[in-house]
Image: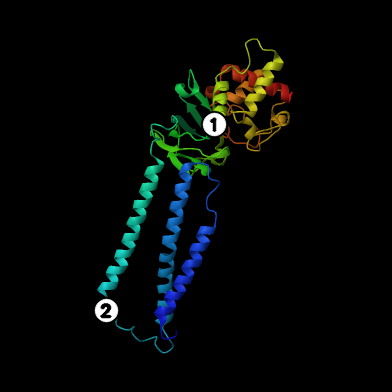
Amino acid sequence: MRGRPVLVMVIAGVVASAIGIALGLTIHWFPTEASTQLGDIKTLYDVIIIVSVPVFVLVMTVVIGAVVRFRMRPGQEDQDGPPIHGNTKLEVLWTAVPAALILGLCAYSYVVLRDAERAPAATAPKEINIAVKGQQFAWTFTYPKDVAGGKALSTTELVLPEGRSVKFDINSEDVLHDFWVPEFGMKIDAVPGITTHYRITPNRLGTYPVVCAELCGLGHSVMRSTVHVVTEPQFKKWLGGQNKPAAPQGASPAQLAAAGKQIFTGASGCSGCHTLSDAGATGQIGPNLDQVLKGQSDAMLHQDIVDPNAAIAKGYGPNIMPQNFGQTLSESDLNALVAYLKEATQ
């Protein structure tokens, strides 16, 4: 073996490649798979690992072998290195093989991404189109009239039916954001003045985080929402309840507060950011409402919701709370929410 350095390098390279590939395929790089697209993306990632690990090992093996074999020995400090002339066959080989690998991976990646963006077949359940707007520091989701029934529905929480293709139309109202649900395996920039798109088909029931993957300002870390993947009947039931008034006309204070509690713990997402004992909410992103809302009038509570920068709690900065509740909540919803917060904190 001592007289066959190339054979030693080949054996070492094969062993190292096998170990590297095994480790690369064993590690769980991705979260729970909740869309059909993520499965194909994971397969693409595995293929890239299988191809790239041997290439990396080959390069490093040659480098290490060359360093060991051609290292300068004592007494050779003033000598020139051995004369080396080119090898055309070797140069063609190390150019053509990497080029073929890169072209093959590019073609495979193109096919996977093209399929991920492909519209559903005519025989598949009707696709849902949802507009996503990012703004410092909240996401707003708008369902069109034909989906929401009667009029468009805007909400800060995303609900999707399992097994139906969803096309997101994404834009930004202020700076660059990045719409990302890790469990769906897809993300894309939200750019002011430009509408970007992507499709997913949820295939696993559950609740998953919606995050911003682009550093967008001081409140970037709290620019989070939630997506609920539910069954088709649950989705229709949720839609049916969203455009109804929070409380019936002439509701009693108790009925109004009950409706407000439902809003607080439901699609508005308030309970995810605030602590409020009555609602069982333990969020830490925003102020503790048990402490900061004591003694506030109806007008002050209303302002806290629709214009949160007008009075900022001590220890918190501006623009942490979404600025769009005045648009996503109806007046009756706001009245119910104010009634509930007053009842729960006074």
Q: Nearer the viewer, residue 191 or 264?
A: 264
Q: Quadrant of residue 28?
A: bottom right
Residue 233, relative to residue 27: is it above or below? above
Amino acid of disc 1 = Val
Disc 2 target residue: 85
Badge 1 local density, few (<14 within 10 Å), some, or many (20+)?
Answer: some
Badge 2 local density, few (<14 within 10 Å), some, or many (20+)?
Answer: few
Residue 241, relative to residue 172: is it above or below? above
- Residue 70 is situated, as x and y percent measured from the top left of the image, at 39, 81
Q: How many marks?
A: 2
- Residue 313 is situated, as x and y percent measured from the top left of the image, at 65, 32
At a point 48% along the width and 69% down the height, the residue shown is: 16
The extreme front residue here reads 123
Task: Point out which mark residue 29 bears.
Answer: none
At a point 48% along the width and 22% down the height, the residue shown is: 152
Disc 1 target residue: 159
Q: Is residue 40 visible?
A: yes
Q: Quadrant of the N terminus?
A: bottom left
Amino acid of disc 2 = His
The extreme left residue here reads 88
Left or right of 137 on screen, residue 105? left
